Image (cartoon, rainbow, N blue to C red):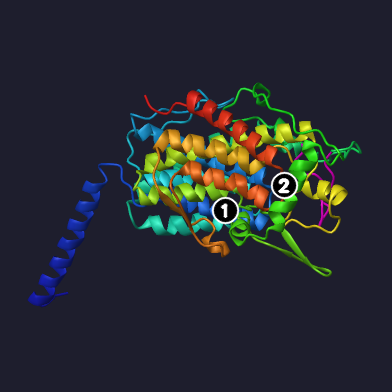
Amino acid sequence: MNFPIKSKCVLFSLIAFALMQASCQQKQETENKIVQNDILSICNMAIQNAIVVDRVAAPVGSRRYVYASIAAYESLVPFYPEYSSVAPMMNGLKATPLPDTSQKYCLDLVAMAAHTFVSKKLVYKEDTIANFRKRQLDFYKDKMSQSMFEASINYGDSVGAHIVKWSKSDSFSYFRGREFFLTRNNPGAWEQTPPDFMEAVEPNWGRIRPVLLNSVRDFSYQLPEKYSTDRKSRFYSITKQVYDTVNLKDSAHLKTAWYWDDNPNASVHYGHATINILKVSPAGHWLSMFSTVARQKKYSLIETAEGMMRLSSAIFDAFITCWYVKYQTDYLRPITAIHDLIDSSWNAPIQTPAFPEYPSGHSVVSSAAASVLTATFGEYEFIDSAELKFGLGVRKFKNFREASNQACISRLYGGIHFIDAIENGKKLGNEVGAYHIEHLKTKK
C-alpha cells in the first residue's frame, strides 16, 4: 500500500516520537524513582478509615499501625545506606528480605506495597484496604515500566509477608476470645459504667509482646490514691476536682475534651436508639498529626517512614505498658466515685471508656509520642488537622509537647480521669518514650 508523502512524514514523526519516549523512559529507569513522596500519609489514612469501620479498641488500632509502619520502613532501608534496619533491635524480628540489586524500583510503590500487604492482613474488613491498594496500583501503573512496576510490588510484598509472619507471634491471636475480666466487689475497684455498661475492654493487652521493650514489668509506677468515703480524704478531693471541673461548663474545656476524645467505640443514646459516633483513635490522631508535619516540613520518603515507624512503635509499646498497669491496679472511674459520693445523676461530657481508670491511656501514649517525635525531629510550630474530617476543626501547637499536654488534661475536662492518672500517666509515657529513644537506632 502506498501512502502520500505527507502521510509518510506524519507516520515517521509519530514513530520517532514513540522511540524517543521509550528511550527517555528507559533512561529514567536506570535509577530508582519516587512518584508520591507522601504515600505513607495516604496509607495511614486508609488504616484509619478501616479502624473507624471496624470500631476496634484503641490498643488494637495501634497494632495495625505499628506492623504496617515497620514494614514500610524496612522495605526502604536497603535503598538508603545511611539508615539501618531495626530488625536486630525488635523482639523476635529476623533479618528483612533484601531487594534484587539487578532491578530498579519505585521506592514509594515498594513502601505502599509493604504497608498495604500488612494492613490488609490485620483489619477485619479486608476490602477496605484491598480497594485502596487497587486504586493506588492503578495510579502507579502508567508511571513506570512494567518491569519496575512488578519488581516494586514483589519486593514490597515480600517485606510485608515477612512482617506479617512476625506479627503472628505476638500472642494477639491467642488472646482473641479470652477477653473476660472478672469484676471485683472491692471498694475502689473498677465497675462497668454508663451508658452501655460494657464488659472490660482488652484485659489481656498487657500480655501482648512489645515490639521493642524488654518487659512492661521493667517500669515502676505509683499506686493510685486509696479509695475513701471520708470527705476530708485526698480521694474525695480528687473526685470533687473532676466534678467541679466538669460543672464549670467551660466551653474551651469542653471543646478540648471532644477534640482529644479519640474513642473509636463511642456511642450516644436517644431513648431506645443508639448512635455510634465515628472517631479517630489515639494512634491515628498522632500519626495523622505527624503526617501533616511531614508535609509541612517536606520530609523525604525515608524521613517520613522513620518518623512513622518510631512513633507507631512507641505508641504500641505505651499501650501495652499502660494496659498492664490498668489491670494490675483495677481502679474505678470518676463517674462511679461521683455517683457514690457526690451526685448520683452526674454524667461526664464524653463517654467513659470501658476499662479501668489508672493510668490515663491518652496521657501515657501522648507523652511517649511527644518524647520520641521531639527527640527525632526537634521543636517547631505545626497545625494539627487530624480532627477536621470529624467536624472538630484544626489546632495550632508550639511543639509536640504542648499537643501532648493538652491531650493529657483533656481527660480531666472530659470527666473520665482523676488528676493522678493524668500526671502519673505522663511519667510512665515519658519513660516508655525515653526507652525507645535510647534503644531504637536507625542511623549508621
Relative depth, front residue between 94 and 247: 247
161 shown above or below 144: above
Q: Which residues are magenta?
A: 189-203
Helix, strand or loop at mark 1: helix
Residue 356 visible in the shown view: no
* Picture coordinates of residue 236, whole percent (x, y): 80, 42
Q: Main secondary structure of the magenta part?
A: loop
Residue 154 placement: quadrant: top left
Between disc 1 and disc 2, the foreground one is: 2
The local crowd at label 2, few if under 14, some if 14 to 19, many if 20 or more residues have their Cα within 10 Å, is: some
Q: Position of residue 30 (x, y in %)?
A: 25, 42
Relative image position of residue 334 (x, y in whole percent): 77, 47
The quadrant the C terminus occupies is top left
Residue 413 seen in render = yes
* Residue at x 54%, y 54% (from the top left corner): 46
Give the mark nearer the N terminus: 1 vs 2.
1
Magenta region includes residue 196 = yes
Residue named by callout 1: 48
Q: Which of the 4 quarters of the picture holds residue 267? A: bottom right
**Residue lying farthest to the right in this orientation:** 185
Name the residue: 74% across, 29% down: 223
Q: Amino acid at mark 2?
A: Gln
Distance of mark 1 from mark 2, alpha carbons?
Answer: 34 Å
Q: Is residue 43 left or right of residue 198?
A: left
Q: Position of residue 34 (x, y in %)?
A: 33, 47
In this picture, is 2 found above or below 158? below
Q: Is residue 180 left or right of residue 132?
A: right
Q: Return the residue nearer the eye: 175 or 432.
A: 432
- Amino acid at circle 1: Gln
Residue 241: which disc? 2
